[in-house]
Amino acid sequence: MLGKETPKQRQERLSKRVEKTRREAAQRLTKDAVIQCRVELGQMDELQEIARAKGLSVSALTRMWLLERLRQEKSA
């Protein structure tokens, strides 16, 4: 039986691999979070106009503004 693994060994090997994958996935998930917010259509139009003028997406613009505000609050 040289080179063959028993069902128990296979189960242990697979369990370790699953656990490793879970840990790696959890680490990736905890790096970023997603925030959703609602704005009026007119406000969205304004955001799109400003973002376009700056060469950014609306998402990048709002993220930039949010991070700037967080820094302001932290230093206040």
Image (cartoon, rainbow, N blue to C red):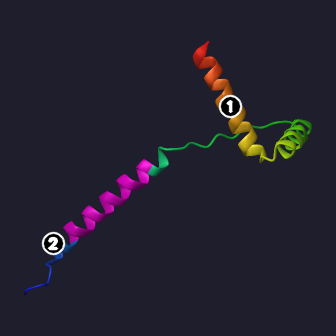
Q: CA distance from mark 1 to mark 2?
A: 52 Å
- For the point 81% across and 47% down, the residue is 55
Give the mark nearer the N terminus: 1 vs 2. Answer: 2
- For the point 25% across and 62% down, the residue is 16
Question: Is the residue under label 2 in contact with that under label 1 (CB below 8 Å)?
Answer: no
**Residue positioned most to the bottom:** 1
Residue 69: horizontal and vertical position, in percent? 68, 25
The front one of 21 and 72 is 72
Question: Callout 1: 10 Å neighbours few (<14), some, many (20+)?
Answer: few
Membership of 21 in magenta stretch? yes
Residue 53: horizontal and vertical position, in percent? 87, 43
- For the point 42% across and 48% down, the residue is 27
Secondary structure of the residue carrying numbered label 1: helix
Instruction: Decide: is 24 above or below 43.
Output: below
Q: Which numbered dot is residue 66?
A: 1
The front one of 51 and 27 is 51
- Residue type beneath disc 1: Leu
Quadrant position of residue 45: top right
Residue underneath mark 2 = 8
- Residue type beneath disc 2: Lys
Name the dominant secondary structure of the magenta segment: helix
Left-right relation of 46 to 60:
right
Question: Callout 2: 10 Å neighbours few (<14), some, many (20+)?
Answer: few
Quadrant position of residue 46: top right
Q: On the rendered image, what quadrant is the N terminus found in?
A: bottom left
Quadrant position of residue 36: top right
Q: On the rendered image, what quadrant is the C terminus found in?
A: top right
Q: Which numbered dot is residue 37?
A: none
Residue 24: horizontal and vertical position, in percent? 38, 55
Residue 2: horizontal and vertical position, in percent? 7, 86
Q: Tell me the magenta residue range.
A: 11-27
